[in-house]
Amino acid sequence: MDTNWDDLRVFLTLAREGTLTTAAKALGVSHPTVARRVRALEKQIGARLFERLPDRFAPTSAGEKLISDTEAMERAALSIGRRSAGLSDTVSGVVRLSAGEAMATLIARHLPGLRERLRQIEFEVIASHTLANLSRREADLLIREQVPELGGIVARKLGRVAYAVYAARDFAVGRAMPASLADVPWIGFDDDHSYMPGQHWLQERLGGARPAVRCNNWLVLHEAVRAGAGLAVLPCYLGDPDPTLKRVGGVVPEVFADQWLLVHRDLRALPRVRAVMDAVVDLFQRQRALLEGRS
């Protein structure tokens, strides 16, 4: 049986997504196309692969058996794609770099210099909390605060980011800091993002109370501080260059975040990826004082 890989890819996506609509969105096709390709595969194999339930498509026993083989084919196809990309010997093309929104802002701030240095490279800067899948080439490079326990990932430490307390320039702050921390309004992250740097430190000083204003994004938090909504813990590279903010006290020694540059081992020798890696490492070295709150 000569099964079409595209049909198998559609089958695997539907098995993962559960509905025609979400599978079609993931594949970039219409949902009638997904249904047609699945029917064609079922006809070719001679077995029903899904139970059509009211709210989702559930794999049958035959479908479950096919999933593992199809996933193995997918891994092989992705590996071939990455290795084929690594055969290029030109420093040109697209490089996708994913980082959290605050770090993505720092990269964006220095894009003119990066573009001047790497004229033949097109940059895609993706701001996201979530970990892009390097194996599936959702990104070529990641900047993250932890190294995930995933096979095939190569990590290089870029440096350490310091944090401090910031307020708007005209925001009245009492002198009895940090004893008066609980007496002023604070801006922090919501419960789903309480793992962000500085949030545990802040909660301890607020006696377990929640900040008066909560959000889920560094840039929203930054803007709220600029508007005078309260005090917040910000990375120094975000707060120090902002003329509308003032630092309240020094760097908070207990709050910091190491930054790691992550790449899949199959792509690290790709010239355009290697060139961007070198440029990012150089950028972090040149911005070390700012990152560490010493600027």
Image (cartoon, helix red, strand yellow):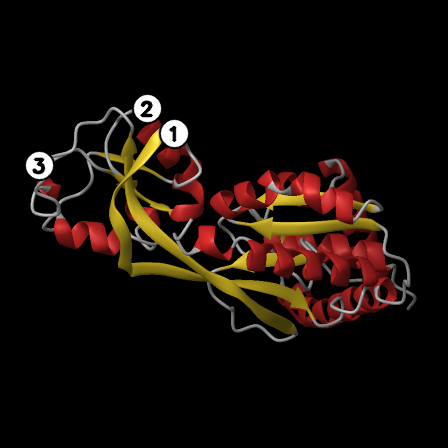
Q: Is residue 66 left or right of residue 80?
A: left
Q: State the CA–CA distance, disc 1 to disc 3.
A: 21 Å
Q: Earlier in the sequence, mark 1 or mark 3?
A: 3
Q: Earlier in the sequence, mark 2 or mark 3?
A: 3
Q: Residues within 10 Å of mark 2 (few under 14, many from 20)?
A: some
Q: Residue furthest front?
A: 295
Q: Residues within 10 Å of mark 1 (few under 14, many from 20)?
A: few
In the image shown, does 110 or 93 lie closer to the viewer? 110
Residue 161 falls in which quadrant of the image?
Answer: bottom left
Q: Looking at the rendered structure, which numbered label has been put on residue 227?
A: 2
Q: Secondary structure at mark 3?
A: helix
Q: Looking at the rendered structure, which numbered label has been put on residue 294?
A: none
Q: Residue at x 61, y 75 (%)?
A: 151
Q: Residue at x 42, y 34 (%)?
A: 242
Q: Where does label 3 land, which residue?
A: 183
Report x, y in % for residue 270. Answer: 81, 64
Q: Is residue 156 left or right of residue 139?
A: left
Q: Secondary structure at mark 2?
A: loop
Report x, y in % for residue 88. Answer: 90, 62
Identify whether 287 is placed above or below 241.
below
The reply to whether discs 1 and 2 touch (Cβ–Cβ < 8 Å) is yes
* Dot 1 amino acid type: Glu
Number of marks in the rendered image: 3
Q: Where does label 1 land, which residue?
A: 223
Report x, y in % for residue 279. Answer: 69, 56
